[in-house]
Amino acid sequence: MSDNNFIIKLHSSDERIFKEIFKKYYLPVRSFAWRFVKDNDIAEDIVQDCFLNVWEKRLTFNVITEIRSYLYTSTRNACLDYLKHEQIKQKHAIHLLTTASQEEEQEYILEEEVDALIHQAIGTLPRQAQKMVIMTLNGDSNLEIAQKLNVTVNTVKSTKLKAYQILRKRLRNVQWLLVLLT
């Protein structure tokens, strides 16, 4: 079927015609997009958006005589827009990295030091308490911890309570740092 016939039938909002257009042009247009962006997922997204545009604008296609040309042109433009946007994002990221203030660097260093002190303190706990605290930090609930370690929920609660008391004593000197970081 010719592009002109496709356009005429698209005006009737016949989804079967749209599917035919999709089958006929999707793979070549996606390959065309890939040559620009060098990423299959992004090429697919761009081409799907272009096809969606065809469907959404099907009633205004009086001026367009060739769907093929429209798809390739809109895909090329969308790829170029994507590449420009990516280039701007890269420039912005580089700018942020090069202009990071010493204050941000110091804050990061401080966070790393506090994190190291906390992990060091956790390392001094009894083995079972270490596991439970680490599992809690990883987001596990008391029930999940109990199931994984084959103990009761009450054992988890009491072990964690004792572990937190020990950690508070050992980290008493760094509590002021924790306040600064929050």
Image (cartoon, rainbow, N blue to C red):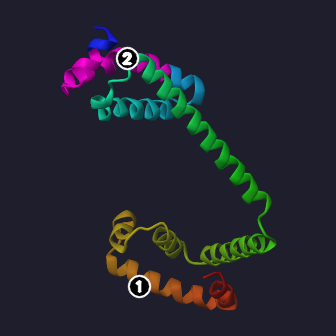
Q: What stretch is highlighted in magenta?
A: 6-31
Q: Which residue sits at x=33%, y=21%?
A: 22
Q: How crowded is mark 2: few (under 14 residues within 10 Å), some or many (20 or more)?
A: some
Q: Where is residue 99 in the image (x, y as percent from the top left)?
A: 79, 62
Residue nearest the observer in this picture, 177 or 132? 177
Position above or below: 96 against 174? above
Q: Where is residue 15 in the image (x, y as percent from the top left)?
A: 21, 26
SS of the residue at dot 1? helix
Is 105 situated left or right of 88 in this image? right
| Quadrant occupied by the N terminus | top left
Q: Which residue sits at x=55%, y=77%?
A: 126
Q: Residue 56, located in which quarter of the rendered image? A: top left
Q: Which residue sits at x=18%, y=25%?
A: 12
Position above or below: 137 against 74? below
Residue at mark 2: 65
Question: Residue 10: within the magenta?
Answer: yes
Q: Report the label total.
A: 2
Residue at mark 1: 158
Residue 100: which numbered mark, if any?
Answer: none
